[in-house]
């Protein structure tokens, strides 16, 4: 237990030899250190999870996820540790808040970053269902676009085919009506166009000949329609329209399983809305509160450090810093004074040496001087 406490003290950025002297402060820094440690742990898990989906399908995806998760968690841990340790409790409350403000903003950003991959895992099932709907709609829209482009490309052929089909439908309708009239004539049903006399008479024979002729025309027209449709089908096959089909359930499951981080992140944002576009308040609130939970968790070490009263450990650290600063200044004064004395000694020595050189030169000049010729 003592080793665990010392580890959490290290995580909090506390000076362990000083903290050991004040037992009343140790629990506070154990809590701060544990919060920082678990924040780094969550960051490692979320970063590794995000990287796993970036390289999903690669043989080294797990290795990349572990390495990046460790580095990301270590970076967040070190940053949090510095943020908490750098808050000066000896300063005034306003100054502490001013010091903590940029750190809180940074903690909010970190909380948002590390919460997103964990949110992706929490809503994994809902994300997959939303991705399936998106992929299916996208494929349907792609097929519609291809069909519209194809119809525009072969507009003349489609116009002729539609005209032939309209003529076919008109002929079939006419033949059906003529057959009914023929039956009325044969069975003696009196209408404005039949004689009302039962039997197979001249009118029936003429009507039957007309029907036979129009049937022949219909058969010929159907043959032409079949040729046109065969041509269109071949062009569709050539342009690849037959290969584009709606995804099956198995294909949708496979696509949602291998979806990348960007697709999953987009789907998570779309969970705040229903498929029909209306807002899903329940899911939106759940996603928002999970994000806020991680943001608060990330800011918690800073808040704990700000809210905690200044204890004996803080006084000891402040006093130690003050003593260290005083020693540093005295060491500076000492080195400056020594440097000044050395400089003065060097100046005096150099001056004495120069004086002796000048005197020696003057003596030699006097010895060489010709006193007899003077004047």
Image: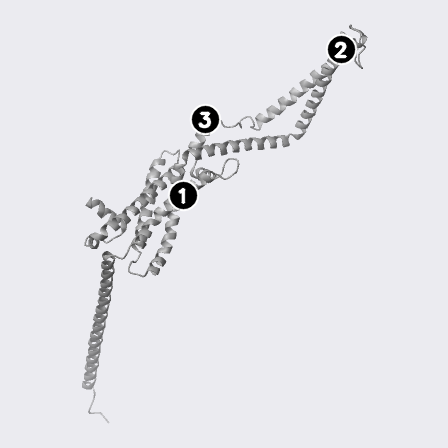
Q: Is residue 239 left or right of residue 368?
A: right
Q: Residue furthest bottom?
A: 375
Q: Secondary structure at mark 1?
A: helix
| 3D distance between C-alphas at marks 2 and 1 | 79 Å
* Residue 53's disc number: none
Viewer-nearest residue: 339 or 163: 163
Please identify the quadrant where the N terminus is shown: top left
Viewer-nearest residue: 345 or 243: 243
Residue receiving disc 1: 289
Is residue 183 shown above or below 146? Answer: above
The answer to whether one can see residue 44 in this image is yes
Q: Badge 3 local density, few (<14 within 10 Å), some, or many (20+)? A: few
Q: Badge 2 local density, few (<14 within 10 Å), some, or many (20+)? A: many
Residue receiving disc 2: 184
Q: Earlier in the sequence, mark 3 or mark 1?
A: 3
- Select label 3 or label 1 by which is in front: 1
Is residue 284 shown above or below 135? Answer: below
Position in image of residue 311 (x %, y %): 25, 56
Q: Secondary structure at mark 2?
A: helix
Q: Is residue 98 left or right of residue 220?
A: left
Position in image of residue 108 (x %, y %): 38, 49
Position in image of residue 57 (x %, y %): 39, 33
Q: Earlier in the sequence, mark 2 or mark 1?
A: 2
Viewer-nearest residue: 341 or 131: 131
Q: Are marks 2 and 1 in contact (CB under 8 Å)?
A: no
Residue receiving disc 3: 250
| 3D distance between C-alphas at marks 3 and 1 | 34 Å
Position in image of residue 139 (x %, y %): 52, 31
């Amino acid at each position: 237990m003592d080793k665990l406490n010392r580890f959490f003290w290290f995580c909090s950025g506390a000076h362990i030899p000083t903290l050991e002297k004040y037992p009343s402060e140790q629990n506070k820094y154990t809590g701060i250190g544990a919060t920082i440690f678990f924040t780094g742990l969550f960051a490692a898990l979320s970063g590794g999870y995000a990287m796993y989906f970036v390289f999903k399908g690669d043989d080294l995806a797990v290795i990349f996820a572990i390495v990046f998760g460790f580095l990301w968690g270590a970076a967040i841990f070190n940053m949090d540790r510095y943020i908490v340790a750098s808050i000066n409790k000896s300063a005034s409350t306003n100054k502490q808040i001013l010091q903590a403000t940029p750190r809180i903003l940074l903690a909010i950003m970190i909380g948002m970053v590390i919460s997103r991959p964990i949110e992706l895992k929490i809503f994994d099932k809902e994300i997959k269902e939303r991705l399936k709907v998106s992929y299916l709609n996208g494929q349907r829209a792609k097929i519609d676009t291809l069909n519209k482009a194809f119809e525009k490309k072969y507009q003349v052929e489609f116009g002729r085919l539609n005209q032939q089909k309209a003529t076919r439908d008109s002929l079939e309708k006419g033949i059906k009506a003529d057959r009914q009239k023929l039956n009325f004539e044969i069975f003696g049903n009196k209408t404005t166009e039949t004689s009302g006399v039962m039997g197979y008479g001249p009118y029936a024979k003429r009507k039957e000949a007309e029907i036979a002729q129009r049937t022949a025309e219909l058969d010929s027209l159907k043959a032409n329609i079949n040729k046109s449709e065969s041509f269109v089908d071949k062009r569709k096959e050539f342009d690849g329209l037959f290969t584009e089909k709606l995804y099956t359930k198995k294909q949708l499951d496979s696509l949602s399983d291998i979806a990348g981080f960007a697709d999953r992140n987009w789907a998570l944002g779309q969970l705040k809305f229903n498929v029909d576009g209306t807002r899903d308040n329940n899911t939106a609130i759940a996603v928002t509160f999970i994000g806020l939970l991680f943001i608060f968790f990330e800011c918690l070490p800073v808040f704990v450090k700000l809210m905690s009263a200044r204890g004996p450990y803080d006084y000891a650290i402040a006093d130690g810093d003050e003593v260290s600063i005083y020693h540093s200044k005295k060491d500076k004064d000492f080195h400056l004074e020594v440097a000044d004395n050395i400089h003065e000694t060097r100046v005096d020595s150099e001056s004495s040496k120069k004086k002796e050189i000048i005197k020696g030169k003057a003596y030699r000049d006097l010895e060489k001087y010709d006193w007899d010729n003077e004047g």
